[in-house]
Image (tube, grey):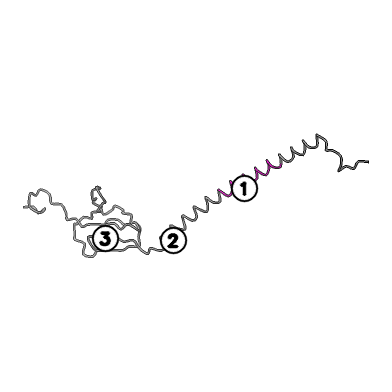
Amino acid sequence: MIEDSERPPREGTEDADRRNAVEKAVEEIKRAEADLARARELEERAKAVLRDAEKELERAEHDCFEFFVGKVRYETRHEVLTGAQIKAIVSNWPAGYGLELERHGDEPDRLIADNESVRFHYRHPLHFTPVPPATFGGGGRDGVAV
């Protein structure tokens, strides 16, 4: 008598086994792709959290923003100040004088209005200059009307 283990497998069983193996492999691939998509989403979230933490750390490392008026260095804990607030920080600000922001390169310097906001940067201090009031109707020397 021939035992079951010695009998040759039937053709139909081999095909069914292959189909089952392929279906299982396809399901595993689908699960792996879903896991990969979730991992990528988590990675993006983690990167966003890391960027926010790095920004917060940078803020914490810098107690203040610095800026210059002429050659004198000033500090503030505020990221944004108005022209009037900057003038108030500078001791003995000359009455009637304007506040000019020095620009880089070919950019023209810009007069800052008292109610205009200026945003400071940690790594790039801004430079300002006091500007005497304009003299109108003059024709004099050094901006002084004759």
- Residue 30 position (above or below residue 132): above
Residue beneath disc 2: 57
User: Percent from the top left, x then y, of residue 116?
Assistant: 29, 52
Sequence-wise first label, 1 or 2: 1
User: Where does the magenta region start and end?
Assistant: 24-40
Q: Furthest-right residue in view?
A: 1
Disc 3 to disc 2, C-alpha distance: 25 Å
Disc 1 to disc 2, C-alpha distance: 32 Å
Q: Which labelled disc corresponds to residue 8?
A: none
User: Percent from the top left, x then y, of residue 95?
Assistant: 19, 59
Residue beneath disc 3: 68
**Quadrant of the rendered structure where residue 83 is?**
bottom left
Residue beneath disc 1: 35
Q: Nearer the viewer, residue 130 or 23?
A: 23
User: Percent from the top left, x then y, of residue 36?
Assistant: 59, 47
Side (left or right) of 100 relative to 145: right
Identify the residue at image location x=31%, y=61%: 66
Q: For the residues carrying marks 3 and 1, which lies nearer the camera in this image? A: 1
